Image (cartoon, rainbow, N blue to C red):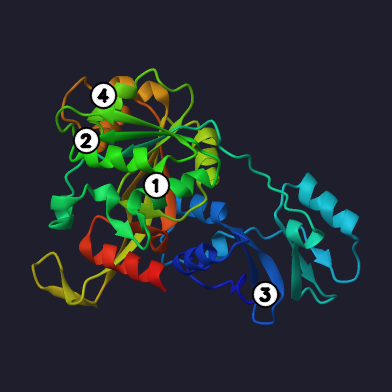
């Protein structure tokens, strides 16, 4: 119980971190007497953030205040199953006669592994793996960045596993730098999923080679950098893109930056107004994981150096819809930086 119950006055940032650790993806919000005040999902937090809420604000305006609940000793397995199915819930809180939370019930408690979301077995994945990886030299002088090892597997296999876990089986890997080594690795690996190489004859930036895939796909598809590991619900991400009717969706990490000094604020006369001691600022950082609609590829110029940021700007200028899917900063690791790479290696070792 302790891992999914939270107080009503915790911050959005704190709630994101708790949600990132729990398998239930739903928190029970309680007061000091453990009385149930509501439920909070990652979708609730996402809506608050996209509506302009700051990560330092409490969750009082984010959680759902009239959740479906059960009273201890006053329900049957059949009633639980019906409520979970009819209301498309994964979890039901159980309260005592005073309204205090005493338990919760999920599909697994009923002996069923019921999933409300379908596998994305027809959704293609593009992995941008053609870069030189200069930030990871001297290792990348020998190996292409996607093959840098984390424990017993290279980075690219960890990335692919995130997608095969939700049923994806069609991978398109853009290659340029040390492409023969990367191709040889996959030929030797002989995986169960399908993989295709997209050849860059010259470096084309972080999005230029996507143009080679124009007219290849019939539905929205994932695009990911080859040096990021993201722990999030990829099915929820895809549903977010589809339901929002977005043309491009980017995954953004909630990052907090603290200035380790007192900052000086001036008044209109150029005199000191006040000092902010070690102020913190919240940002949403682009992680390098996207979903694109197939027709967006036609905006990419042929055989020209072109970055994904240019594509997003061109999509925006065309009046198209761009979605932002916020995740917790602990859910994103940029393995293309030495400090982060060493952190991930440590994490996978223990």
The quadrant of the picture occupied by the C terminus is bottom left
Q: Real-space Cα distance between discs 4 and 1?
A: 20 Å
Question: Which residue is more in the foreground, 115 or 134?
Answer: 134
Residue denoted by label 2:
307
Q: Which residue is mark 1?
A: 251
Disc 2: CA contacts within 10 A as few (<14), some (14-19) or many (>=20): some
> In which quadrant of the rendered view does residue 174 lie?
top left
Q: Earlier in the sequence, mark 4 or mark 2?
A: 4
Q: Which residue is mark 4?
A: 300
What x and y, as percent, mark residue 238? Answer: 51, 39
Percent x, y of residue 176: 20, 35
Is 106 or 247 nearer to us in this picture?
Answer: 106
The Cα–Cα distance between marks 2 and 3, rounded to whole angstroms, is 46 Å
Classify mark 3: residues with Cα within 10 Å, few (<14), some (14-19) or many (20+).
few
Please tell me in which quadrant of the rendered image residue 214 appears.
top left
Q: CA distance from mark 4 to mark 2?
A: 9 Å
Vertical order, 162 against 333 (above or below): above
């Amino acid at each position: 119980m302790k891992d999914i119950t939270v107080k009503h006055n915790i911050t959005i940032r704190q709630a994101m971190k708790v949600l990132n650790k729990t398998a239930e993806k739903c928190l029970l919000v309680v007061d000091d007497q453990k009385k149930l005040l509501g439920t909070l999902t990652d979708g609730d937090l996402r809506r608050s953030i996209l509506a302009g809420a700051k990560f330092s604000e409490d969750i009082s305006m984010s959680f759902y205040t009239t959740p479906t609940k059960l009273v201890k000793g006053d329900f049957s397995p059949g009633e639980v199953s019906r409520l979970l199915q009819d209301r498309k819930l994964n979890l039901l809180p159980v309260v005592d006669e005073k309204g205090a939370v005493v338990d919760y019930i999920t599909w697994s408690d009923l002996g069923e592994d019921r999933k409300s979301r379908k596998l994305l077995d027809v959704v293609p994945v593009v992995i941008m793996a053609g870069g030189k990886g200069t930030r990871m030299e001297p290792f990348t002088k020998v190996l292409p960045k996607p093959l840098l090892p984390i424990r017993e597997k290279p980075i690219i296999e960890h990335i692919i596993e995130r997608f095969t876990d939700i049923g994806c089986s069609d991978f398109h890997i853009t290659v340029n730098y040390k492409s023969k080594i990367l191709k040889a690795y996959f030929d030797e690996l002989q995986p169960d999923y399908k993989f295709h190489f997209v050849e860059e004859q010259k470096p084309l930036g972080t999005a230029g080679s996507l143009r080679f895939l124009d007219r290849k796909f019939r539905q929205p598809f994932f695009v990911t950098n080859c040096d990021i590991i993201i722990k999030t619900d990829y099915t929820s991400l895809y549903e977010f893109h589809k339901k929002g009717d977005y043309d491009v969706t980017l995954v953004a990490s909630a990052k907090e930056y603290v200035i380790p000094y007192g900052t000086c604020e001036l008044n209109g006369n150029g005199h000191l107004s006040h000092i902010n001691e070690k102020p913190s600022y919240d940002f949403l950082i682009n992680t390098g994981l996207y979903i694109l609609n197939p027709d967006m590829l036609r905006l990419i110029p042929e055989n020209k150096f072109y970055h994904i940021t240019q594509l997003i700007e061109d999509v925006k200028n065309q009046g198209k819809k761009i979605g932002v899917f916020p995740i917790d900063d602990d859910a994103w690791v940029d393995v293309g930086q030495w400090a982060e790479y060493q952190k991930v290696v440590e994490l996978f070792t223990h």
